[in-house]
Amino acid sequence: MYHTIKTELTDNIFFIYINRPDKLNALNQEVMAELALAIDEVYSNPQIRSAVITGTGEKAFVAGADISEFLTLSAEQGADLAKKGHVVFKHIEDCPKPVIAAVNGFALGGGCELAMACHFRIAATNAKFGQPEVNLGLIPGYGGTQRLTTLIGKGKAMELMMTGDMISADDALQWGLVNYVVAPGELLPKATELLKKIHTKAPLAIARVIKCANAALDHNMDGFELELNEFAACFATKDLQEGAQAFIQKRPAKFIGE
């Protein structure tokens, strides 16, 4: 089905591997199209409770965009390319099921933007992050200027984007870009551990957490009003009844997503 990515479903976790190790998993239009299809599957397949996006090989998560595609693009074509990237990454960000980026090496340019579109990030100790687009006469075009500023603050984000420098996994942790730094061999086990814990929670509540947290960054939405409405909607679910009864009875809850 796919040529540039690989997928596997294990324990209700959908693993999506960007699979161009000879190109350091660089994003091209085919990768973006296939990634969009994989995310559609996360949305639609009831067997999938969550997803992990990572790269194949030991060097790179995604080391940027495929620059060879840029050489012949006009401004109009560049705008179209960016719009497609915005759509795919927003689709990841808005996914009602948790999506974790497991950053196993270089996450540069579009790769850093992809990682930031996920709900949170886990980095291997050898991971490197950066937005080096200014070295090419470009700026981040898939939402990176906005998400990076939100995640690490305006000052650090502007420094990173203006210098084009890379930062280490430890710096990314300190700056708030990633949640955890682990040894390379522990990267997917750590992602799996976190997602299995999330799987024990109420799926509808998880989806509402994602929706409301995203609204905090959307200037066109009243996040407080949305939270009020989503909180109220929880009271119409079987999961709230189950969760409350389980708490009172001092037993684990068995949520069904209804």
Image (cartoon, rainbow, N blue to C red):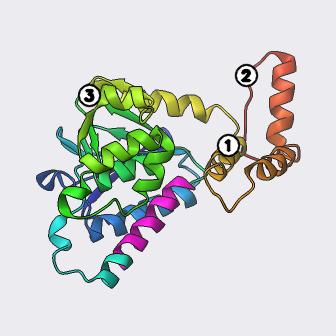
- Residue 229 place in picture, x, y as percent: 83, 51
- Residue 138 place in picture, x, y as percent: 26, 64
| Mark toward the start of the polypeptide (2 vs 3) | 3
The foreground one among 124 and 156 is 156
Give the left or right position of residue 80, taking residue 133 as reference.
right
Residue at 31% in and 61% down? 139
The answer to whether any part of residue 143 appears in the image is yes
Give the left or right position of residue 98, taking residue 137 as reference.
right
Q: Amino acid at mark 3?
A: Pro
Instruction: Return the residue at label 2.
Output: 252
Residue at 33% in and 28% down? 171
Residue at 24% in and 48% down? 164
Q: Is residue 206 above or below residue 26?
A: above
As measured in the structure, the alpha-carbon distance from the residue carrying label 2 to the one carrying label 3 is 33 Å
Magenta residues: mostly which secondary structure?
Answer: helix
| Mark toward the start of the polypeptide (1 vs 2) | 1
Q: Nearer the viewer, mark 2 or mark 3?
A: 3
- Residue 17 place in picture, x, y as percent: 31, 49
- Picture quadrant of residue 190: top left
Instruction: Return the residue at label 3.
Output: 184
- Reply yes or no: does residue 88 show up in magenta: yes
Residue 209, numbered label:
1
Q: Is residue 41 above or below residue 120?
A: below
